[in-house]
Image (cartoon, coloured by chain):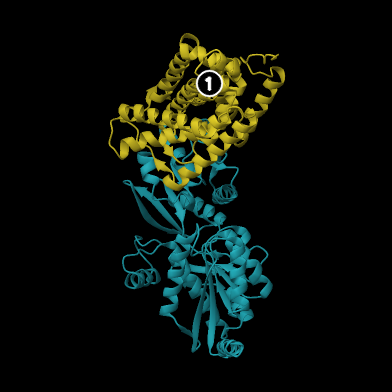
Chain colours: A yellow, B cyan
Amino acid sequence: MNLATFIQNILNSLTLGSLYALVAIGYTMVYGILRLINFAHSEIFMLGAYFVFWGITLVHLPWPVAMVLAILVTASLGVLVDQVAYRPLRDAPRISALISSIGVSFFLQNVAIVFFQAIPREVYRPQWLEDPILFHGVRVLPLTLFVPLLSLVLMLLLIYIVYRTKTGLGMRAISKDIETSYLMGVPVNRVIAITFGIGSALAAASGIMWALRYPQLQPIMGTIPGFKAFIAAVFGGIGSIQGAVIGGLTLGFIEIMTVAFFPDLAGYRDAFAFVLLILVLMVKPTGLLGERPEDKV
Amino acid sequence: MRKLLFICLALVLGLANVAYCADDTIKIGVFLPLTGQNAFGGQLELDGVQMAHKENPTILGKKIELFVVDNKSDKVEAANAVQRLIEKEKVQAIIGTYGSSLAMAGGEVSEKAHIPQVGTSCTNPLVTQGKKYVFRVCFIDPYQGAGAATYAYKTLGLKKAAMLVDVASDYSVGLAKYFERSFTKLGGKMVGTLNYQSGDQDFTAQLTKIISEKPDVLFIPSYFAEGAIIMKQAAELGATFKIMGGDAMDNPKITDIGGKAVEGFTHTTFPYDPSMKNMSAMAKKFTDGWRTMYPGKEPNVNSALGYDAYMIILDAIKRAGKADPEAITKALAETKAFEGVTGKTAINATHDAEKPVGLVVIKDGKKLYEGEIVPEL
């Protein structure tokens, strides 16, 4: 492997890893606050991508407008999903909400198959994203530089919201003890709705970035990235925002470098990623940056 | 009241008996998906069969009667449909079907009843495997791989090939195996075979490796969902080699999704397309006949295969000199040079059709039927 190929692989890893990180942030945020793995995240991700490209192709909106609108619509959809599928189960055992989220995931996916059809659709990309920058035999896509930056910005923004705002205070209170939060006057349902709104906006943003990188829309497009990002979030320590970013990047590097150094294993690289995940969890059961589960009295 | 019912019953039975006794007709059953998920392809094939029947309603001086049953795109229904054709309608031969799993379910029944069945567009190798009475007018998946290799090496003169194969798909693995076998046999060199799994969306690592091996051609026996974005990523990574694929890449959306990246992409297909240049006399006759019979509806390869399935049975009956199921089966197995709409067809030892492989190339953002090639296995 010469130097140019090696650097190309590092860039490939960075692109893939930061996309995983972006999706993982959304998973980990909802989990960190509600202790709910929102399996519908990957479908919200898919819908976000569809919305933006509809905005562009059907309504002829300019790019940035379509993107902001799609994120807002998806965020509202996330709040709606919470109201319909999770809120009635707030006092039920946690497993019920988990099952409900799996149900929502299947429901949204099938609705998408019925209305958008299963045939893959094209994605319109602005020209400045199309042309790679050539640098000493290494090709850099503009998106390769943009996505890690976006992940970083969103990560910092999220940390700010959770640790520096009043809503964030409510979120942290709910994550510690939901019943006491009620007693302390935290507007629990509103804070949870906001959490889902932000989580879904993140899913939409990552869905859009994913569709720009792999320009093809289909109803099942969220499933595999969703699974991978979930793994990344667990690997980094589910509930930890920084952990999700580190987990996503690590997974991206493992996947690309496995193929780069062991080309014969290319078809089984997912198995590799899973084995690594299990090994890490055996040594650190809470993930790289996960908190120790606190004993409740 | 009971008497009336009795009379009715007697009448029905009598009529059925008359139909059964009428020995001067030959009965051909058709089972195709006319409802359900495969209805679109099934209907086109039925249109082809019915057109062939309308043009050729008699053989050996006997009238041919068609019995059409809908298999509803369902495996159980497919078996029932064949059962009904054999037991109730007493057909001497069966045409069908679109969809390999449906053909397999129906084929089990025909095999047990010793009635010949001719598949239309069921391409899975298992459909005819170990069957004495099941045939098909399409070639099977691996055969195309050899066609692609022959075209790459002989026609285009490309000497070094790489492959990107979906290890989770029998179709992809089968196609790749035969491409490699044929390509190396012809004298070409394989410089790298990399794998992925259905559902993957990032191929940059594999493509970076392949680009570093500098092949002349990359063969991607993929489904459409992966194929277009593989080409897109290859272009972004600066690939300049030729890319080829199989019939699963045949999709009208390919240029919408792939854009400039799919320009020059060539895939194999069944050798019929209404837009093909240098049409054979049969294909031309079929296309013109279709347009008069079904105005406003374009024929496609499925309708051509439906047409050919009917005609190859007639050809077998003519050569056998009688319409007895055993005789038809024997004659079908001996088919050497049947002139079909989809090219000159021979039935091989495994009862699959061998015929030239069609080639489609993407040129100026449009699909162009390039021509045919005879694979060198």
Q: Is residue B340 visible?
A: no
Q: Which residue is mark 1?
A: A29
Mark 1 residue crowding within 10 angstroms, few (<14) / some (14–19) / many (20+): many
Residue B80: image location, x then y, percent? 61, 69
Q: SS for tag 1?
A: helix
Q: Is residue B197 above or below residue A152?
A: below
Q: Residue at horizontal 53%, vertical 37%?
A: A104
Q: Is residue B197 above or below residue B36?
A: above
Q: Residue at horizontal 46%, vertical 59%?
A: B270
Q: Residue at horizontal 58%, vertical 64%?
A: B103
Q: Is residue A183 visible?
A: yes
Decide which of A25, B193 is in the foreground and name it.
Answer: A25
Q: Quadrant of the N terminus of chain B?
A: bottom right
Q: Is residue B151 left or right of residue A252?
A: left
Q: Is residue A255 above or below residue B58?
A: above
Q: Quadrant of residue B113?
A: bottom right
Number of callouts: 1
Subunit ID for the residue under disc 1: A
Decide which of B106, B1 is in the foreground and name it.
Answer: B1
Q: Residue furthest top?
A: A164
Q: Residue at horizontal 67%, vertical 20%?
A: A280
Residue B182: image location, x then y, percent? 56, 52
Q: Amino acid at mark 1?
A: Met
Residue A260: image location, x then y, percent? 56, 28
Q: Is residue B351 left or right of residue A157?
A: right
Residue A273: image location, x then y, percent? 62, 28
